[in-house]
Image (spheres, rainbow, N blue to C red):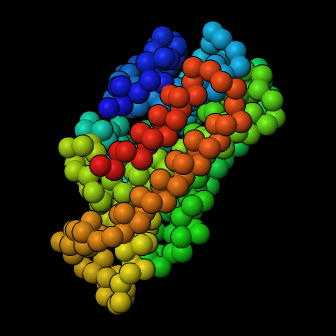
C-alpha cells in the first residue's frame, strides 16, 4: 500500500533527486563505507520523511529548489544514521528482512559509520544556508540522542507511567517528522502560523506512526516486520501496548516476574499482550493523533498536497490491520 500513496507519486521525480544526492555520499567515501551506504540506502525504507519535507516546501514554492532537495536528503540521512546506531544498541542482525551493518562489522566500526552519516546529514543541512534550518537540525539530533539515552537508562523499568512514553517516542520518531515538515516550511517561505501548523502536523503524524509501530511489534509477523516480533519487550522497552496490558492485570508483579524467566516466558507474555485489549487501546490513541494531524492542515493554503497529507495520516493508522 505504501507505493500507492499519492504523496509519493506526486513527489516521485524529486524523491529520485534526493536518492541521487544521498548516493553521492559514496563517491569520495572510503571503499567499505561507500559499499555500506549503498547497502543501507538500497535496503528499502518508506522515504516518508523526505517526502514530508518536500510537500511542506511545495505548499509555498515550486519547483523544489536545490535547498529543498538538500534538506530532504539531510532528514533521510539523519534517519538512516539513527537506524545504524539503533541496530548496534539493540544487537539487531536483521532489519527490513536484510542483514544489518551491525551483523557484519565490529561495534567500533558501526559507531563510526553512524557518526559519518550524522556528519554527512549535517553537511546536507548546511547546504540550505538557512540558519533556522541548521539550528533545527542540530536541535533534532540532540533530542534524538537524549531520547535514546532515556530509553537505555529506563530499560526493564516495567512500571513506567504513560507520561514517560510520549516524550520517548517524540524523541525517537516524531521529532524527525516534525523537523522535516518545519524545515520544508521554512525554506518555502511559510508564515509563522503556517510553519507551526506544518510542525504540528509532522509531530502528530510521527506520534501516530510510532504508536502503530509499537503495536505491530506485538501484532505483526516477522516476514512483514523484517525483524523478530516482540523485540521491544525482549530489550526491556516499555511501549504503549504493554503499558495498557500491565494496567489491566490484577497481579502485575506476576507478569513482571515472568519477564525474567527466560525466552519462552517472554514469548508467552508477548502472546498475552497480543490477545488482550491493550492493542486496541493503544490504537485508539494513535487514531487520535492522526485525527489531530488532519485538523492541523486547516491552517494551510489549498493545494495539491492537502488531500495527500490527509491520506498519509489515515495510512499511518491503517498499518495495524
Q: Is residue 21 left or right of residue 134?
A: left
The residue that appears at 27% across and 57% down in the rendered structure is 219
Q: In the displayed structure, would residue 219 be above or below residue 122?
A: below
Residue 117 lies, in percent from the top left, at 53, 31
Residue 18 lies, in percent from the top left, at 52, 17
In the rendered image, the quadrant that contains the N terminus is top left
Would residue 207 be seen by someone viewing this image from the given angle?
A: no
Q: Quadrant of residue 234?
A: bottom left
Q: Nearer the viewer, residue 315 or 265?
A: 315
Q: In the displayed structure, would residue 295 be above or below residue 237?
A: above
Residue 124 lies, in percent from the top left, at 63, 22
Residue 65 lies, in percent from the top left, at 66, 11
The residue that appears at 78% across and 22% down in the rendered structure is 189
Q: Is residue 179 left or right of residue 73?
A: right
Q: Is residue 113 left or right of residue 224?
A: right
Count of picture labels = 0
Q: Nearer the viewer, residue 312 or 136?
A: 312
The residue that appears at 63% across and 33% down in the rendered structure is 181
Q: In the displayed structure, would residue 289 be above or below residue 80?
A: below
Residue furthest left in the image = 264
Amino acid at each position: 500500500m505504501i507505493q500507492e500513496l499519492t504523496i509519493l507519486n506526486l513527489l516521485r521525480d524529486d524523491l529520485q533527486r534526493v536518492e541521487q544526492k544521498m548516493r553521492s555520499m559514496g563517491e569520495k567515501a572510503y571503499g567499505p563505507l561507500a559499499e555500506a551506504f549503498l547497502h543501507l540506502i538500497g535496503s528499502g525504507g518508506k522515504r516518508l520523511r523526505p517526502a514530508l519535507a518536500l510537500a511542506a516546501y511545495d505548499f509555498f514554492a515550486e519547483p523544489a529548489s536545490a535547498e529543498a532537495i538538500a534538506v530532504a536528503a539531510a532528514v533521510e540521512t539523519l534517519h538512516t544514521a539513527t537506524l545504524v546506531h539503533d541496530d548496534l544498541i539493540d544487537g539487531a542482525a536483521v532489519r527490513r528482512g536484510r542483514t544489518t551493518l551491525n551483523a557484519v562489522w565490529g561495534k567500533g566500526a558501526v559507531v563510526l559509520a553512524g557518526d559519518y552519516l550524522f556528519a554527512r546529514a549535517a553537511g546536507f543541512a548546511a547546504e540550505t544556508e538557512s540558519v533556522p534550518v541548521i539550528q533545527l537540525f542540530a536541535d533534532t539530533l540532540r533530542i534524538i540522542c537524549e531520547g535514546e539515552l532515556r530509553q537505555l537508562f529506563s530499560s526493564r523499568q516495567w512500571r513506567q507511567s504513560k507520561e514517560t512514553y510520549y516524550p520517548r517516542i517524540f524523541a525517537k520518531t516524531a521529532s524527525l517528522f516534525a523537523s522535516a515538515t518545519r524545515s520544508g516550511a521554512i525554506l518555502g517561505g511559510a508564515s509563522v502560523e503556517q510553519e507551526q501548523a506544518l510542525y504540528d502536523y509532522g509531530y502528530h503524524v510521527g506520534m501516530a506512526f510510532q504508536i502503530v509501530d509499537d503495536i505491530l511489534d506485538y501484532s505483526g509477523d516477522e516476514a512483514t516486520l523484517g525483524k523478530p516480533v516482540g523485540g521491544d519487550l525482549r530489550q526491556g522497552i516499555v511501549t504503549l501496548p504493554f503499558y495498557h496490558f500491565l494496567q489491566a492485570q490484577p497481579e502485575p508483579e506476576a507478569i513482571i516476574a515472568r519477564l525474567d524467566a527466560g525466552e519462552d516466558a517472554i514469548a508467552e507474555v508477548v502472546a498475552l499482550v497480543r490477545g488482550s485489549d491493550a492493542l486496541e487501546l493503544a490504537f485508539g490513541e494513535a487514531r487520535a493523533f492522526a485525527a489531530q494531524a488532519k485538523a492541523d492542515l486547516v491552517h494551510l493554503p489549498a493545494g495539491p498536497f492537502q488531500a495527500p497529507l490527509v491520506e498519509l495520516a489515515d495510512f499511518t493508522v491503517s498499518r495495524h490491520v
